[in-house]
Amino acid sequence: MGLIWLGCFIGMVFGAIHFLSWRSAFPTHTQLLLWRISSIVLVAEPFSLALLYLQVTLAADSDRAKGLWKALVSSLGYFFMLISMMLGPIVYIFARMALLVLAFLTLRNPPSPALQTISWTTYIPHL
């Protein structure tokens, strides 16, 4: 049970790191939107999986939930958890691939200040 929480937390932190490029310069507006959507997916998928897992475990362990309500909440939770566990990794993988491709596409057309020679590099000894 602890591994599920740890995996969801690590997945959300990894996705949140991509939010640092939220206002970065991209060659096209489409690439910017794709980066933002993929970053949101990388955070939202582990978060939704954690919420669904929490809902299912609370519904199954609750002493106050009785009868039909307990069965309904538990079965709906299991249904949504199953859907999230089947479709979530596919969407997550596509979002990761999109971020990887976008990172390389952005390298082909860097902004002009990135191509300027920095003057302090002449003082670094190199071969």
Image (spheres, rainbow, N blue to C red):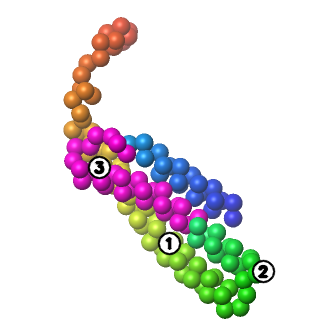
**Image spot of residue 81 (x, y percent):** 55, 75
**Image spot of residue 90 (x, y percent):** 42, 67
23 horizontally vs 66: left or right:
left
| Viewer-side residue, 22 vs 27 | 22
Task: Identify the secondary structure beneath mark 2.
Answer: loop
**Label 1, on which residue?**
84
Q: Residues within 10 Å of mark 2 (few under 14, many from 20)?
A: few
Which tag, 2 or 1, sits closer to the chain's start? Answer: 2
Marks 2 and 3 in Cβ contact (< 8 Å): no
Q: Residue flagged by tag 2: what amino acid is it?
A: Asp
Image quarter of residue 20: top left
The residue range painted magenta reads 22-50
**Image spot of residue 94 (x, y percent):** 37, 61
Q: Residues within 10 Å of mark 3 (few under 14, many from 20)?
A: some
Residue 107, visible in the rendered structure: yes
Marks 2 and 1 in Cβ contact (< 8 Å): no
Residue at the image position 27 percent from the left and 28 percent from the top: 114
Q: CA distance from mark 3 to mark 1?
A: 26 Å
Q: Main secondary structure of the magenta part?
A: helix
| Viewer-side residue, 29 vs 6 | 29
Residue at the image position 59 percent from the left and 54 percent from the top: 9
**Label 2, on which residue?**
63
Q: Residue flagged by tag 1: what amino acid is it?
A: Ser
Q: Which of labels 2 and 1 is toward the front?
A: 2
Task: Identify the secondary structure beneath mark 1.
Answer: helix
Residue at the image position 62 percent from the left and 83 percent from the top: 73
Q: Residue flagged by tag 3: what amino acid is it?
A: Leu
Q: Give the label on residue 32, or none.
A: 3
